[in-house]
Image (cartoon, rainbow, N blue to C red):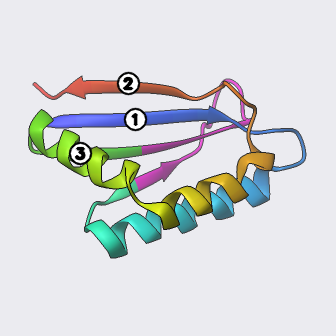
Amino acid sequence: MIAFVRVVSVKPGKTAAAMAFAKDISAYIKTVYGVDLEVLRPIGGNPQRVAWSGRYANLADFEAFNGKLLGDAKYWEKVNTAAEYFVAGSFFDSIWQTV
């Protein structure tokens, strides 16, 4: 099993809008691709962050999903409208293998 986690920093004063976007984009991905992405927020450390976490059977499934997403114009439209909520360059992705 592969776990993918994306963490991004939220601009000051944009937490509510960023969380609303995080939930909206997760719902879009569930509806269009059938992929469950959890929306996460920290309860310790820097509170100005949001994360998404998803699980895939293997790297091939993750790569196939990611390829579809990269070509999805509606997804990118949604992402680009939310750029004002996040700190540019603060995205951090990690891919984990469950044991």
Q: Which residue is mark 1?
A: 5
Nearer to me, 9 or 32: 32
Nearer to me, 42 or 30: 30
Q: Residue at left 64%, top 29%?
A: 44
Q: Which residue is mark 2?
A: 94
Where is residue 6 drawn, in percent x and y? 47, 35
Q: Is residue 43 magenta-colored?
A: yes
Q: Residue at left 66%, top 56%?
A: 19
Q: Secondary structure at mark 2?
A: strand
For marks 2 and 1, give the CA distance.
5 Å
39 w.r.t. 51: above or below: below
Say what amino acid the circle numbered 1 marks: Val
Rendered-image quadrant of the N terminus = top left
Say what amino acid the circle numbered 2 marks: Ser
- The answer to whether 62 appears left or right of 78 in the picture is left
Instruction: Mark 1: give few (<14), some (14-19) or many (20+) Cα within 10 Å.
Output: some
- The answer to whether 68 appears left or right of 17 in the picture is left
- The answer to whether 48 appears left or right of 4 in the picture is right
Say what amino acid the circle numbered 3 marks: Arg
Q: Is residue 73 magenta-colored?
A: no
Instruction: Mark 2: give few (<14), some (14-19) or many (20+) Cα within 10 Å.
Output: few
Q: Secondary structure at mark 1?
A: strand
Rendered-image quadrant of the C terminus = top left
Contact between labelled residues 1 and 2, with CB atoms less than 8 Å apart: yes
